[in-house]
Amino acid sequence: MASAQPPQPPRIARPDMPGDFPEHIAIIMDGNGRWARRRKLPRVMGHRQGIDSVREVTTECARMGVKSLTLYAFSVENWSRPEEETGTLMGLLERFMVKERQTLEDNAVRLRCIGRLDDLPAGALAELRRTEDMTADNQGMVLRLALSYGSRAELADACRGLARDVAAGKLRAEEIGDETLRDYLYDPDTPDPDLLIRTAGEMRLSNFLLWQVSYTELFVTDKCWPDFRRVELLDALRQYSGRQRRFGGLVSEADQGPDLAARGEREQRASG
Ligand code: FPP
């Protein structure tokens, strides 16, 4: 009997955009507490509503053909919140893993987690690992959840690995280049994010993927995470598609659109 095929990527329904489409999107999901406070609801209601956004944004990205989506779900600093809130978040995470597994399967999404995962409660970690295993062969988008994640912690962990390899003689200090550290990060195989979205308006990176976002395009919206849905995602994609990424270099006039290219030609004719 032929072996069962792993879930294939969903048929891509990509919105019409004039320019590029991001392959890797990272999101700082902020403002759950504010969303709840404005409605005089307990904070947990903001987190619950935030899960609906996680489901909708994940599904939309998978269907649009985004290759990787990295969500900042819980930072190392979040452990300093009251135990009641961290416990609630861990409970929500555990239930999400059980309840949404089928949605991930249906959309051929592969789950991966990054961060100091040993800090997570055993129940939540077990469900995460189960979902990672069950979705490991899926051929669609990779959903990376950053949990108990901090970029400084990741860089410290990476430096420790690198130092060990130098001490063991596997690598010489002189051989360390700009890209060497990447091999020691939590997920070296995933290319850097093209687009970083932050909700709830703060203009900061909050210890998220500091090494990886060196050339990432930023999009900050005032919408709180529970209100960030398909329409807001499309707005971010549209803005990204109008950006010119230069990676520190120059953009040729032809790449700057017909107006500039025509002006360049006119100037050349006039001068010569
Ligand atoms: C920030 O809002 C959000 C978080 C600390 C957690 C994000 C978690 C979820 C969306 C739900 C669980 C996630 C998954 C993947 C199941 P905040 O509490 O800092 O908001 P505030 O700044 O307005 O107080």
Image (cartoon, rainbow, N blue to C red):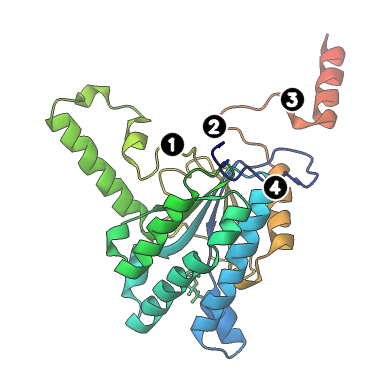
Depicted 230 relative to depicted 157: above or below: below
Is the C-beta of the residue carrying label 3 under 8 Å from the nearest atom of ligand 1? no
Depicted 89 relative to depicted 13: above or below: below
Answer whether residue 187 is visible to the viewer in this image: yes
Q: Residue placed at 35% from the left, 55% from the top?
A: 115
CB-based contact (under 8 Å), mark 4 and mark 1: no
What is the x, y in percent for residue 167?
Answer: 12, 32
- Mark 4 and mark 3 lie on one chain; the one further toward the N terminus is 4
Mark 2, residues whose alpha carbon is within 10 Å: few (<14), some, or many (≥20)?
Answer: few
Mark 4: secondary structure? helix
Mark 2: secondary structure? loop
What is the x, y in percent for residue 164?
Answer: 16, 36
Mark 1 vs mark 3: in front: 1
At label 4, the amino acid type is Met
Mark 3: secondary structure? helix
**Which quadrant of the structure image shows residue 27?**
bottom right
Mark 4 vs mark 2: in front: 4
Give the residue number, with chain letter if any, for mark 3.
253
Answer whether residue 146 is visible to the viewer in this image: no
Q: Residue placed at 48% from the left, 67% from the top?
A: 98
**Which quadrant of the structure image shows residue 200?**
bottom right
At label 3, the amino acid type is Glu
Give the residue number, with chain letter if any, for mark 1.
189
Depicted 21 relative to depicted 261: above or below: below
CB-based contact (under 8 Å), mark 4 and mark 2: no
Q: Is residue 16 left or right of residue 122?
A: right
Give the residue number, with chain letter if any, for mark 4.
64
